[in-house]
Image (cartoon, rainbow, N blue to C red):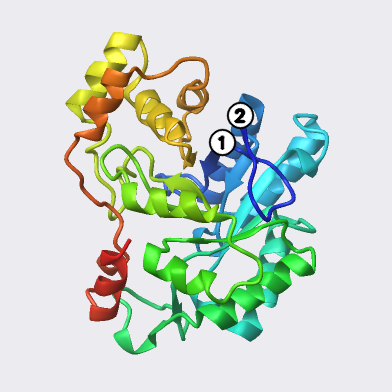
Amino acid sequence: MQQVTLKNCDKAMPAIGMGTVLSSRPGADPSETMKSALLEAIKAGYRHFNTAFIYQSEKPLGEAIVEAIHLGFIKSRDELFITTKLWCTFAQRDQIVGACKLSLRELQLDYVDMYLIHHPLRVSETIQKFPVPKEIIHPLDIKGVWEGMEECKNLGLTKGIGVSNFSCKKLEELLSVSKILPAINQVEMNPIWQQKELREFCKAKGIYITAYSPLGAHNTIWGHNRVMECDVLTQIAKSKGKTTAQVALRWIYEQGVSLVVKSLNKERMKENLQIFDWSLTRQDLEKISELPQHKGFNLASRFGPHDFLLQLYAEI
């Protein structure tokens, strides 16, 4: 597994991570399904796992880590890179350390390797239903919240801190008040949403991008199949004897970006790791650069079409 060196983080990060949003299957316990998949992923060679409070996968991930050590798949937790995220209901200065400790209890860990602000907004009440009432959605106090994130790092609760779903504008605001710069900005990115401007900005500022939904997040509320059904990617894959998914993931890697990809299928898990011993040609890259762009993720599709959210996610 290729490793990525991050600024302001005390540990290198594997270039490919596994996503862990719980999936429901008829007649199956989502937590047990996820735990089994995580054990298979560790056996296959995954060492970076991407979770979040809202994913409800911290507990099965923690259980999988304990079992993986017991079974001898890994010698210690230190072999893994664990990312989790601060959820919007805890996005206040005085709640962040407690929220991080809550995640650590679920994970059965003393520290995580990366702790991210999940979204650049605050929700003032526990979400009971969707869409979310606009009265409980608020702008993020970036200075106060980042101070809480910095405290988490200074206390040793996390080796690195960063953000997710932050635009150039939001990053500028954060950089103007931060003592510890964000190591990561985790955002939607794939050949159909290439994030060129954001990538250039983050590179100039020393912020590493991690791509989520690298294959388009098909079968999610907001996802699409444009990546996996893209004729250009499929043709490139056939010419190289690779899968369309492998071409999409290799393209991301060649942009100097790490990624998190999710599959519960053992064979696809292995295939998604097999992107390091071959490369795309200049012609391949040119074809991909010309693909029509379509953004997939928009929190307003879940939270509701509130003006604040529509404006916020138009920036990303």
Lower position in the chain sequence, tag 2 or tag 1:
2
Badge 2 local density, few (<14 within 10 Å), some, or many (20+)?
few
Farthest-out residue, bottom: 135
Q: Nearer the viewer, residue 241 or 288?
A: 288
Q: Considering only vertical position in the picture, is 45 above or below 198?
A: above
What residue did someone put label 1 on?
15
Q: Nearer the viewer, residue 294 or 127?
A: 294
Q: Considering only vertical position in the picture, is 129 above or below 118?
A: below
Image quadrant in which you'd find residue 105? bottom right
What residue lies at 66% left-to-right and 64% top-to-bottom?
A: 103
Quadrant for the C terminus, please.
Answer: bottom left
- Is there a contact, CB below 8 Å, between mark 2 and mark 1? yes
What residue lies at 65% left-to-right and 77% top-to-bottom?
A: 148
Q: Nearer the viewer, residue 106 or 178?
A: 178
Q: Amino acid at mark 1?
A: Ala
Q: Secondary structure at mark 2?
A: loop
What residue lies at 77% left-to-right and 68% top-to-bottom?
A: 154
Q: Secondary structure at mark 1?
A: loop
What residue did someone put label 2 on?
2
**Residue 264's spot in the image, x, y percent?**
48, 35
Q: Amino acid at mark 2?
A: Gln
**Residue 67's spot in the image, x, y percent?**
75, 40
**Residue 93's spot in the image, x, y percent?**
61, 83
What is the distance, in whole Å, between disc 2 and disc 1 at their CAs? 6 Å
Farthest-out residue, front: 204
Badge 1 local density, few (<14 within 10 Å), some, or many (20+)?
many
